[in-house]
Amino acid sequence: MSPIRIPVKPGLRFEDLCEVRIIPKTGCYVIEVVYEIPQTSEFFCSLNPELNAAIDIGLDNLATIVFNDLAIQPIIVNGKPLKSANQFYNKQIARNRGFRSLGKGKSRRIASLVRNRNQFVDSYLHQSTKMIVDEFVSLGVTHVSIGKNEQWKTRLNLGKRTNQNFTQIPHAKFIEMLTYKLERVGITVKVTEESYTSKASFIDWDIIPTYQPNNKVKHVFSGRRVKRAWYISKTGLKIHADVNGALNIGRKSNPEGFDSFKSILRDKGCQVVHPRRITPLFKRVHAESRVA
């Protein structure tokens, strides 16, 4: 009924199409194409029932991914582009609000800035989760543990600047996207609390307690975190702090899958390899400069 042609996903069948929504936005219209994805069994056959993964969510490192196989290199998804986009967005919003009386009222320019920022964040999260899912499918991961504490942003007290950077990144949306994409290919996902996982020492196999608000007991751990990216064990061995946290999340959420590390650490010591950093939107992969 119209000469306008809308590009859709290649191979989309007409019988899978559910609806097309036209949503008016500031300065544009958004067209959403809703369709069903048929279930396929090709992914389920290629999974390795013994391979598990754990993910630690962060700021500069949006997601740190480790595996219960020392032969597989840990992966870090770069979060700095999101942090940079939010900082520029805050600067532009403050600048444009200064032009208005008392900083109030509607502005098409501000609405455009909000829309552009949200579109960039959504695109970055979709590309990040797609890269993670493709990596897991190629390796054959069966079970994934993701750390997330309740009210971890409303009760945050890391300073004004860090609070602003951390709260503006939609980690819950990232976890939701990743969860439904992983479950679609047959990978089991478990979102669990991650209290004390960044403080406990994976190398020393510390006991990881669960945070209780009314418990006044002060827990003591073997190692300590220094600066931002380093964790030093009891014996003085350095490990990437986010890798240490992700491994502890795997231990706490999926002890059966990560229990094999205990004998390896006791007999041979730590063998954590260098994490590999990936950046969506930029087709390049480089090694993490901070080695374990």
Image (cartoon, grey):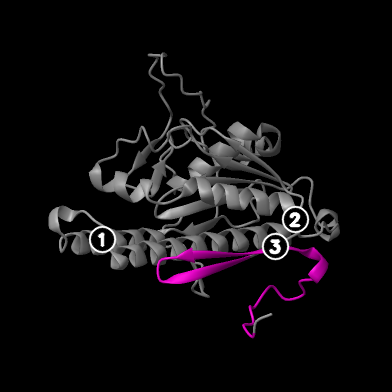
Residue 227 at x, y percent in the picture: 31, 46
Element under disc 2: loop
Q: Which residue is pictured at 28% across the width and 59% down the height?
A: 106
Residue 32 at x, y percent in the picture: 60, 65
Quadrant assignment, res 33: bottom right
Element under disc 3: strand
Q: Which residues are magenta?
A: 3-32
Q: Earlier in the sequence, mark 2 or mark 3?
A: 3
Marks 1 and 2 close (CB-CB < 8 Å): no
> Mark 2, residues whose alpha carbon is within 10 Å: few (<14), some, or many (≥20)?
many
**Spatial CA span between label 2 and label 3:** 34 Å
Q: How many marks?
A: 3
Above or below 28: residue 195:
above
Q: Nearer the viewer, residue 51 or 58?
A: 58
Q: Nearer the viewer, residue 253 or 67?
A: 253
- Determine which residue is flagged by label 3: 19
- Determine which residue is flagged by label 1: 93
Q: Nearer the viewer, residue 87 or 63?
A: 87
Residue type pointed to by label 1 = Ile
